[in-house]
Image: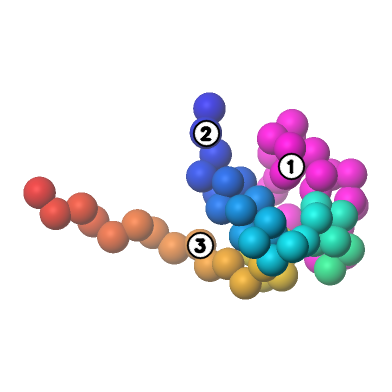
Amino acid sequence: MSDPIREAITARAESLGLTAYAVAKQCELDPGTVKRYFAGRCALNSRYVSAICEVLRLELRPKPKSRK
């Protein structure tokens, strides 16, 4: 199953040239946990995702309603 939040996070980290380890260190999170999340092998709670998004300067917001 696709995880659009994980995909956005990993794409942003890649575009910034940051590894999972580098992101984890900046967030003060366990590097192994962040690496497993980036690889799609585990889920993270909202506190971890929020910390990662802050470091990557990502913002979670609702999609605009589609026009029909």
Left or right: 63 as drawn, with respect to 5: left
Q: Tell me which corner region of the image, top left, top right, bottom left or bottom right, holds residue 36.
A: top right
Residue at point 80%, 48% (across, down): 34
Q: CA distance from mark 1 to mark 3?
A: 17 Å
Which residues, given as a range, are shown in magenta? Answer: 27-48
Under circle 2, the secondary element is loop
Q: Residues within 10 Å of mark 2 (few under 14, many from 20)?
A: few
The residue at which mark 2 appears reads as 2
Left or right: 25 as drawn, with respect to 17: right
Residue at point 72%, 44% (across, down): 38
- Reply above or below: 21 against 6: below
- Reply above or below: 11 against 25: above
Q: CA distance from mark 1 to mark 2?
A: 13 Å
Image coordinates for residue 4, horizontal then vertical, percent? 51, 44
The residue at which mark 3 appears reads as 60
First-in-chain label (1 vs 2): 2
Image coordinates for residue 53, horizontal then vertical, percent? 64, 64
Residue at point 61%, 53% (across, down): 11
The residue at which mark 1 appears reads as 37
Q: Amino acid at mark 2?
A: Ser
